[in-house]
Amino acid sequence: MKRSNKSTDIVHKNTDSPVIIDGILLEDIRELIESAKSRFAQTANAALVTLYWNIGNRIKTDILGNERAQYGREIVSALSRQLTAEYGKGFSEKNLRHTIRFAEVYPDEQIVSALQRQLSWTHFKEIIYLDDQLKRDFYAEMCRVERWSTRTLHAKIQGMLYERTAISRKPAELARQELDSLRNDDLMTPDLVFRDPYLLDFLGLSDTYSERDLESAILKELERFLLELGTDFSFVARQRRITIDNEDYYLDLLFYHRGMRCLVAIELKLGKFQAADKGQMELYLRWLDKYEKREREEMPLGLILCADASYEHVELLRLEESGMYVAEYLTDLPPRRLLEAKLHEAIRMAREQIAVREGVE
């Protein structure tokens, strides 16, 4: 924010004479105080996370040295009573068990040290009870890169973001490579960015609506749509006119993704994905590459949002090789159990298709 050069003086009166405080001086000191408070909060958070990891690791080591489960329960309970008496809240039996779980799922202290700059203890408590290491690493790294609040992280987990992201459908070894690249180099790939399906229930659409209704609803709820897309997306244009050979075409939505450093074209389709949709999107991407892509930007990518993704068409056309992705959108959420079953089935089928493709090649 640009600060005005105009000084607003503040007058304080005492028993002798009025004291005039220069407004800019006061503003500068306020900024110093707020900056120091922010740095202190970050330092305190990092210290707390490190403390809890060390406590959990130390207890875990002691409990693992004694194979009796009863011993473990007794030692945690006794420690909690003693530590609470000496240091107050923060050392309840439940919280001590959180610290043990923390040390169990994050045995590498260096990884914890890297994450603690952006993730608080409440972030870690959301992550450590997830049932899969890749899933935990995905949420931790996305939280770090996109700077999610604890509330946003919780919403992403409840919305099954990992299962809706292409990386969950890859073999574990390939998924691990992408997550390691994100951790070590902040390298964001399309498989980490694009989801399927997109949950657009917040648009409040009726049973019958047009593509223009869908587009208008997205723009009306742009902030929530961007949250569903991912925080690195920035809105660029609606109905972007593309003129080729004196013929006008209109791209539904155009965004820019900071992490991938590229334009992302989005086309909205009410029905099933059709093979012809590929040609239309390919034309738009080639035009964007020629006329809109700036120096040092990557090739534009395309996302076709459909009511039905027609996955066999998508597989045969190998759209990702051309920088295109197809995903379904849901304007009405099914029960969580049905959504979960559908996503797990999609993950299973995608991994089988990759295995078959690799076997042929």
Image (cartoon, rainbow, N blue to C red):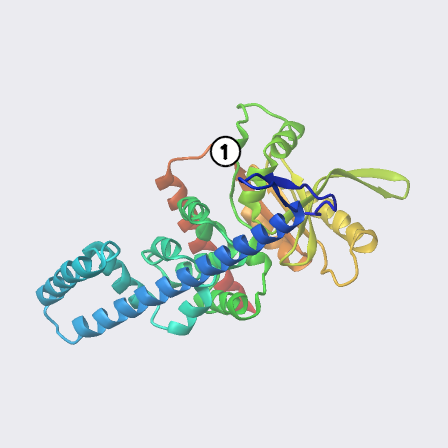
Can residue 352 be seen from the camera position used here?
Answer: no
- Position of 74 with respect to 62 (left or right) is left
Residue labelled with disc 1 = 201
User: Is 250 located above or below residue 63 in the figure?
Assistant: above
Task: Residue at 73% x, 50% y: name it.
Answer: 282
Where does the C terminus fall, quadrant-wise? bottom right
Q: Residue 21's x, y, as percent?
A: 62, 46
Comparing 13 with 322, the one in front is: 13
- Position of 321 with respect to 105 (left or right) is right
Comparing 286 with 349, the one in front is: 286
Which residue type does callout 1 highlight?
A: Asp
Comparing 113 with 182, the one in front is: 113
- Position of 183 with respect to 282 (left or right) is left
Task: Residue at 64% x, 27% y: name it.
Answer: 213
Q: Residue 126's x, y, as percent?
A: 36, 53
User: Is 39 located above or below residue 283 in the figure?
Assistant: below
